[in-house]
Amino acid sequence: MSSGAVYLNEEAENKLVGRIGIWLIMISLLGMFLNACNRNTEAAADPSRALAEESFAGIYLVLSEEAEDAGSSYDLETAARMVTRLGEMGYTAVDSSNQVDMAGTEKMLEFVRMAEKGEKGEVTVIVVDGSHDFLTYALETEDGGMSVTRTSHRMDKDGDFHPESSTCYPAGFWQYTEEGYLVLEGNSFSEEEFVLTLSNVPEHTAFRVQPLDGQCREFNREYVLFPGYGWNNLFLCNWNEGDYGELDFYDLFDLLYPRLYGQINPYAVREGPETEGIFKIPEEILEPVIMAYFDIDQETLRSKTTYLEEEGAYEYRPRGNDEAQYPEIPYPEVVDYTINQDGTIALTVNGVYPYENTSKAYSHKTVVRPLGEGRFQYVSNEMLPPGEKPDTWWRRDRLGAEEWKEHYQ
């Protein structure tokens, strides 16, 4: 793994000069990058300068046409068409969620090579972010350092794109990872905000540069991406059909109910469970949801939940505010797969976490069983390497019965 990481040793400076010294350092940094930021910000306002000899008119035209075709139904196919067309025009482009292979990879790899060798170079990446929005990232490198100018562009009512806002910052950390990502971190600021508050906001960016196998992407969308890592631990603990371990079936009920029935789960209330109380979900409602995606019998499911036998129902406590998760979480990416003799598919998945500047916060092997006609079951999950427990500081487990009552009743 190659790296051009440069960290500012604020702790050491703080010991020497205290808080005033920190301010002086930040002001000094502002001075170092102000000229570059001003230059890049001016370029962002003048599209012909932002992309040097390349004309923004072509970008506006292609995105306007695709946006008109997409209407309100912007989806992955639209993003893929936009990225492909921009690539055909010679641009480096990608979608905002890294679900489409980057166009113009060669330019980005050449930029990374120059950065690693300490040479001077630049590249502009167009990030498609909806049918009416896109971003440009103007990256510059010299002597191993890197600066970023991010500009947002939005379509107006007449179908024309205009620069809406721009921010420039030094990439205090950058790295091209083994998984084929360029990850960047820096403290963004506007000149006015910085001078007034002496504060800034960390920016985390991750571009998948290397293409990903198309079948891996398809399996990811079909089996892994929609549960993801939010509000459930399906892919965050070890379990199999013989031992479901710490798997939380209540969280899975919340997640899978809308997918099975095509409507909002009426029991999953996160806004204020203290006013809603504890629900009793009839077995004929909860069991089909879980059993549609797991080969599990009633006895096992009831042993992993709170089943009220006399009432033929499951006690259910909705998640509340004290069980919320951090908003910035990893996203899954299938990077390899094996089709087993019994028809199951073993997927090797990485947790990509831009917030922590990594394209592999953890890995897991998830096995699924296709059933035909779009149906499937989850068979097992194993954290990799075996026995390793991932750091999931950003999530909270569902409260137990007594804890729930203490918090909400």
Image (cartoon, grey):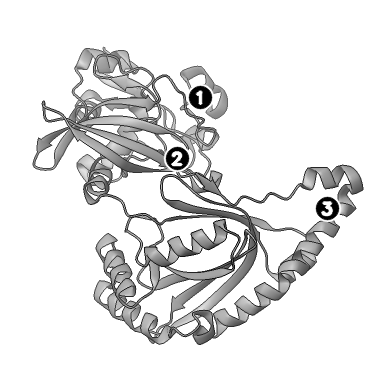
Q: What separation in Å lies between label 1 and label 2 (alpha carbons)?
A: 34 Å
Q: Is residue 390 above or below residue 149?
A: above
Mark 2 and mark 1 in contact (Cβ < 8 Å)? no
Identified by mark 1, the residue type is Trp
Question: Tag 2: Cα neighbours inside 10 Å, few (<14), some, or many (≥20)?
Answer: many
Q: CA distance from mark 1 to mark 3?
A: 43 Å
Residue 316, x across and y down, in percent: 37, 26
First-in-chain label (1 vs 2) = 2
Q: Secondary structure at mark 1?
A: helix
Residue 359 % position (x, y): 45, 44
Image height of 376 relative to 215, above or below: above
Q: Examine the image and state in which quarter residue 185 appears.
A: bottom right
Residue type beneath disc 2: Lys
Q: Residue at x 28, y 64 (%)?
A: 80
User: What amino acid is at disc 3?
Assistant: Ile
Instruction: Name the residue: 58% across, 72% down.
Output: 166
Which dot, 1 or 3, sits closer to the camera? Answer: 3
Which residue bears the numbered disc 2? 360
Residue 184 figure quarter: bottom right
Which numbered circle lies on residue 22?
Answer: 3
- Who is closer to the viewer here, 273 or 258? 258
Mark 1 lies on residue: 404
Residue at left 46%, top 64%? 110
Give the image location of residue 148, x and y in percent.
58, 65
Which dot, 1 or 2, sits closer to the camera?
2
Q: Quadrant of residue 25?
A: bottom right
Q: Is residue 73 left or right of residue 114?
A: left
267, above or below 214, in the image = above
Element under disc 3: helix
Q: Is residue 150 shown to the viewer in this render? A: no
Question: In the current view of this chain or complex, which residue is farthest to the left?
Answer: 372
